[in-house]
Amino acid sequence: MSRFEYAPAPESRAIVDIKSSYGLFINGAFTDATDGKPFKTVSPASEEVLAEVSEAGPADVDKAVRAARRAFERVWGPMAGRDRAKYLFRIARLIQERSRELAVLESLDNGKPIRESRDVDIPLVAAHFFYYAGWADKLEYAGAGEHPQPWGVAGQVIPWNFPMLMLAWKIAPALAAGNTVVLKPAETTPLTALAFAEICQQADLPPGVVNIVTGAGRTGQALVEHWGVDKVAFTGSTEVGRSIAKAVAGSDKKVTLELGGKAANIVFEDAPIDQTIEGIVNGIFFNQGHVCCAGSRLLVQESVYDEVLARLKRRMGTLRVGDPLDKNTDIGAINSSAQLAKIRELSQIGEDEGAERWSPDCELPAEGFWFPPTVFTGVSQAHRIAREEIFGPVLSVLTFRTPAEAVEKANNTPFGLSAGIWTEKGSRILWMANQLRAGVVWANTFNRFDPASPFGGYKESGYGREGGRHGLEAYLAH
Amino acid sequence: MRKTYKLYIGGAFPRSESGRSYVVNDAKGKFLANASQASRKDARDAVVAARKAFGGWSGKTAYNRGQVLYRIAEVMEGRHDQFSAEVAASEGLSAAKARAIVDASIDRWVWYAGWADKLAQVVGSSNPVAGPYFDFSLPEATGVIAVLAPQDSSLLGLTSVIAPAIVSGNTVVAVSSFERPLPAVTLGEVMATSDLPGGVVNLLTGSASEIGPWLASHLDVNAIDLCGIEDPDEARDLEAAAAENLKRVRRPAEEDWSASPGLSRLTQYLELKTVWHPIGV
Amino acid sequence: MTTIDSGVDTLADVTSSEDRLRRFLLGLPGVDQVGAEARAATLGTRSIKTTAKAYALDLAIRMIDLTTLEGQDTPGKVRALCAKARRPDPADPSTPQVAAVCVYPDLVATAKHELRGSGINVASVATAFPSGRSSLAIKVQDTKDAVAAGADEVDMVIDRGAFLSGRYGMVFDEIVAIREAAGDAHLKVILETGELVTYDNVRRASWLAMLAGADFIKTSTGKVSPAATLPVTLVMLEAVRDYHEATGLHIGVKPAGGIRTAKDAIKYLVTVNETAGPDWLDPELFRFGASSLLNDLLMQRTKLATGHYPGPDYFTLD
């Protein structure tokens, strides 16, 4: 062997025990759906059917909301904060104990690399429950008044890109504040949410405090529009977020929405170049680019454009695309054939509009849904690939000359979720951070997440924050 | 000498571009004045003015914004008699009650003025993340706020919905009470002489039901306060229209303008920005 | 400051005056500590198994500068070390030899004698190792003595005091002088990164050494803690990669000190592979300065070959 070829290093699947079919988790027990058809969830890396999952129809959603209401009124609402805290701490511990299993399950169902599910997603899930557990008996200090009250039943709808992490972002603060929840995971990634249902059972969480209803958009709509839901929390596309905002208009429902983005990742000529390249790569190729806050618009100062592009391409050549369960995989599978079609379509539009497309040589597996890491150069603000969220491993590169021009281009979008700044000059970082209309600004880093750190968007990227004290406020009446 | 009551847009006092005006009567039905009846195009112009003013106003130091708000209170004090007379006539109150309302309105400006440079300390945070990063969250203004002001409380209510929006750096397009617009016009005159940059507050007299849909669906408006909409169906439609660009919506609710306002209106028009930076040598 | 013809047009200008050198070094892109360490940590999570592991273990053995640099070193100790270098695992003749044996100058002759005919190089530390605190004349003489005694490679230390006080020209001139004194011997320049502290300094010192004619840049003497670390080595690998990009020249990298396990060594090889690239996966361009590392590599090698965990009693101590 003349080269250092990494042999396959697959994480064992033996640790997960996937059932052939799953019911809905309502009132503490798995139950059959009454009015929906079962659907299949597949591994996007192989198209292998992993399990059959129940679709919750309106009657099932109604049952779940009623169970949550009962649990709220009789058990969870009246319970002392310190006791709620103990349940959440217990859940955090159970997640840590089962972390490898959950990571494998997440990678199987979602297609993300095991390195990420193992080192990022699942540790953050446990950390989220741990963080909010500590809040449960300190709500009067959360900035929502001296006697903050839970809203009641939270209806929560989450996306497929970080299935279990998004579940944690939703459920942990809701339960800490004393709400009960009905959560709908995405139809392509329901398995970790169902595993979480088991964890709730293992934690002896009172029945009805957490209910998991699986299904697609129809189920989500039934949940969001259910009269018994007091608080709606949604993470997903701006399009669906908009329809939810319309649907709840005129009601008493409280809403938080975490929607799409088209973040500018801005590189100045004095950037710490090697870490910047890593930040660009992490910004757009982390989780196959299935990240609402992905740094999908790279804005490079013209004076360093050639150097940045050359280094970026060289680095992209070392990215390892393939089996999500291989511990050396950097880029896994695209989550679904529908998403793959969307990425392909927008990439084709990028080419048609005259941008130059480049990907490193990489062999893609024959089965499953795959897209190579891709960079478009010669992109202008007017191109659709610079304006629309692609939600895939596709980077659009633009240039700028001055800080003011960078700000203008960065802000020239209806979105406002995140932004990146790369420069060694401190005062410029703070000036840029002030100017950028985005809810999360990463300076000399990108795609960092922490339960203590509020996350959420400006403008059409949604409203409300998740994480930190501010994330708790969304679940408290004040 | 009788006064002409006009709109207040971008720091100027135009008549409605539509050329329309409407009769304003006092609480007993006696003629008070003709008010300009703002049109959708006036609203459009007002949004342009508010957007133009946003960068400068939100970019001022909090200390400076606080001083400007305090200045509004000072100048109002000098026009106390005029406000009292207008409030008394508009709302059908005794002179003493009207004076009390004006006092309360001035106090409210002073109260909000003081918030300018404290807000970030109260609602911002330093976030102890599990890694070598300095991570902090700061509130920022949402942008252009459309305010459909209360129909009943022509000065205290109006103050209570505008002040919390602008103190943090937002700019406002407000539609006054339809039947009680005169204090709003006078407030515009106060603002024009209080170091408040033109366009930060734009005051339209006229019908919230007529102008509201244009503001609710305007894609360059970032948030809307539906306070002055009394019909639930109308409020629902405006909220649905506002969803088009995910406006932050303040739904109509029972309000007691004399009560301590708390922070909820103030924080309604804030975005929280979280900034991360590595800590290293 | 000495002007040298580095033979590299693009960078000739840089070393033409102290001021230019200074401006060049201070103009190098900064290194963000957190980002560099995060990258190294990610590279450290690569899982190297089966055939890849076998390749990496043998490569790591071939890259070792088997080192003894103690006050108590004796000819006997060096002879034992040389025997180990020749035949690391007497039980398995397929085990490759190490790259070099590294000793103090006074023991070069012994090592040279013991290694004759083996193809294994003798490396000698020099220039008032490890502190480097003596006159240039003594450092030059130290180097000449080592080469005269047969050293194939010279591991010199830079003047950290001069570097940290910004006298880059002085550091440069000293390397140039030692380069000359070393003649045909391969010159490894020890930066002593544990004393330079920041990655910005590591990057600057790496460029300074390369511009002055280093064949290798080396992290540490082994006498200062921290010695070699993965992120420091990452930054140095980036420097040689960029230098190659600018000049076409290949400069080697040698982390030394603190690398004791096969697992660690493999992390370094992954970092080499994914940073400087496969060209550097060669003892000509990458070395480990180590002593106890060898036995752990041998144990892992045996485990891989036999499927059983061996014990330390089955490997020689030297």
Image (cartoon, coloured by chain):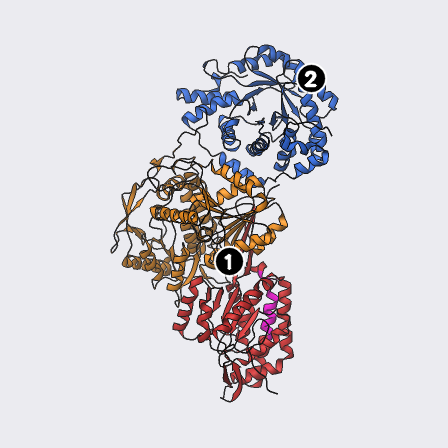
Chain colours: A orange, B red, C blue
Q: Quadrant of the N terminus of chain A?
A: top left
In the displayed structure, does residue A314 sit left or right of residue A43? Answer: right
Chain letter belonging to callout 1? A
Name the residue beneath numbered marker 2.
C144
Q: Nearer the viewer, residue C259 or A354?
A: A354
Q: Residue C32 placed where, x, y %?
A: 58, 41
Q: Is residue A162 visible?
A: no
Q: Nearer the viewer, residue A196 or C159?
A: C159
Q: Secondary structure at mark 1?
A: loop
Instruction: State the image quarter where residue C170 is shown.
Output: top right
Q: Which residue sits at x=48%, y=13%? A: C90
Q: Which residue sits at x=47%, y=62%? A: A148
Q: Main secondary structure of the magenta part?
A: helix
Q: Which residue sits at x=51%, y=84%? A: B24
Q: Residue B276 placed where, x, y %?
A: 55, 49
Q: Secondary structure at mark 2?
A: helix
Q: Residue A409 placed where, x, y %?
A: 53, 54
Name the residue beneath numbered marker 1.
A142
Q: Is residue B113 magenta?
A: yes
Give me the C-alpha separation between circle 2 and circle 1: 71 Å
Instruction: State the image quarter where residue B85 is shown.
Output: bottom right
- What amino acid type is highlighted by mark number 1? Ala
- What amino acid type is highlighted by mark number 2? Lys
Q: Which residues are magenta?
A: B106-119
Q: Is residue C188 above or below residue A164?
A: above
